[in-house]
Image (cartoon, helix red, strand yellow):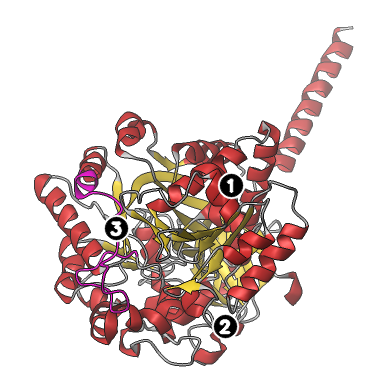
Amino acid sequence: MRCISTTKSVFIIILAIAVLLALTTCTKKPTGADLMLINGKVVTMDDNLSEAEAIAIKDGKILAVGNSAGMQAYQDEHTIIIDLDGRLAIPGFIDGHAHFMGVGKAAMRLKLQKAENWDDVIAMVESAVASAKPGEWILGRGWHQDKWNKPPMPSIDGLPHHKTISEISPNNPVYLRHASGHSAFANQKAMELAGIDRNTENTIGGEIVRDRSGNPIGIFRENAMLRLDNALQKHMDTRTPEQIENNRRKVLIKATDECLSNGITSFHDAGVSFETIEYYKKLADDDKLGVRLYVMISENNDSLRNRLSDYKIIGAGDNHLTVRSIKRIIDGALGSHGAWLLEPYDDLPSSTGLNTETIEDMKETARLAIENGFQFCTHAIGDRGNRETLDIYEEAFNSYPAKTDLRWRIEHAQHLNEKDIPRFGQLGVIAAMQGVHCTSDGPWVPSRIGDARAEEGAYVWQKLMQSGAIISNGTDSPVEDVDPIACFYATVTRRMNNGEQFYAQQAMSRMQALRSYTYNPAYSAFEEDIKGSLTPGKLADITVLSRDILTIPAEEILTTEVDYTFVGGKLMYRNRGRD
């Protein structure tokens, strides 16, 4: 009996060892790369190896960069291989200033960017009203009076009067944002709901445009839009929680799809509420953010004082969410005559624009930012808006000399006085600019500020870089299309739709432009150690383009398509039209 028992015991031990070995073999982690991209032109933006043929990726990070033959050392039977067939691979595009949920919302509203005149806008609104329920708001964005082929009738200073749209939409409030986002049109119904009439006074930092009799024409600049925003929000608050959540999810999906299909892997979200950050944090924790977000907080000083310390977030959700900056707005936009200027507008001599936040409030935000370890990002477009912002920053830096490597930013920095240009480099202030704004706005900029001011300080990229300043590129979408190829083209050509160039000597070289869309925005978000170049150890965020935008003729750049977008080594977008 003992012999039989011993034999059984040995057999059981041998069987257990065999099973353990089998399980070990089956669950053994592959040692090679998860993914390899080979036979391409890889432009790394890494000074140590500027160009290569192939990339090996493992566990969401770049394992190696080199020639295709050399990548065989990182291959095993589990490695997925994609042959780029000569296509261009670059670090994933980083949009250095845009509005993430705004991109999604714009895709769900009337798109007015391509309206050739006010009659086109009227036709789009009329069509929307025909299918809308009574009381439903008609929303849109993108109209711009300086881009129309004829003036609206009737009009005040080239701006449309609400009369026509009020007649075709008596029961539906119509609210249409200007392309800049810094002014808006509202019909009579929307104004009624907002409590606006001829007796309504202008708010600080805002203007209700009126006719000669003092009646609102339906155009609202800057802070004057707040009444309309509140009326719209009151309507939106009548939805059920389920409706609100479903709509928010649709907006997020639209925004994510728009970014990934355009090769954007990271996105600087230029101003959101604490509530939106809570939503992003939940998505990041649940691994449901498809694009990496660098988020700026947009709240008043009282809210910042009470809650700021709870909202510093670095790299949540596997580096999909970072919150470490504050966004404020010191002036408006040039297109709406809201940019704050040192001298009056050439085409509106009675105005120097609008100061939308008091200097004292801005100084208090600067104090809160520097004492809590937050970056400060200020929207400033006019030359006075930029000067005042630089003064505020310089005062804060001098008051806290021990605080270094702050990387504070001016968002847009579009129109500068010549004396202030060197201050960007001297102070280490980042110019977060949008190349596509230059060519989109270019045809009418001289009419606003004159040729001399335009040449001296409008979109002066080379002058800023010569000062030592870092320029981070982006689109300000939904102000412009989120497409980085169109923005890249604008940055290297400065060619406007009329065929002319806007002070071509300030154009970036192609490598400068690519750097402004990859490494520089990573640097401006304190993330250059993990993204912005295709360097071993960094996140495998990669965009593959159908054409080589660094070498093809300039006029062919706009024909380039995004073929693949990888985020953390995961294929998040594939251009099926080119399979």
* Disc 2 + disc 3, Cβ < 8 Å: no
Which residue is found at the position 26% from the left and 55% from the top?
A: 407
Looking at the rendered structure, the secondary structure element under dot 3 is strand
Which residue is found at the position 17% from the left and 53% from the top?
A: 392
Residue 196 in percent (x, y) is at 47, 48
Dot placed on the residue nearer the N-terminal end, 1 or 3: 1
In this figure, which residue is indicated by the disc labeled 1? 289
Please, is residue 194 above or below residue 222 in the view? above
Nearer to us of marks 1 and 2 is 2
Left or right placement of residue 170 versus residue 542 in this view: right
Residue 426 in percent (x, y) is at 15, 65
Name the amino acid, label 1.
Leu
Q: Give the magenta range.
A: 338-363
Left or right placement of residue 456 versus residue 516 in this view: left
Q: Nearer the viewer, residue 290 or 489?
A: 489
In this figure, which residue is indicated by the disc labeled 2? 558
Please, is residue 577 above or below residue 261 in the view? below
In this figure, which residue is indicated by the disc labeled 3? 409
Name the amino acid, label 2.
Leu
Magenta stretch containing residue 150, yes or no?
Answer: no
Quote the CA–CA distance across marks 1 and 3. Answer: 25 Å
Quote the CA–CA distance across marks 2 and 3. Answer: 29 Å
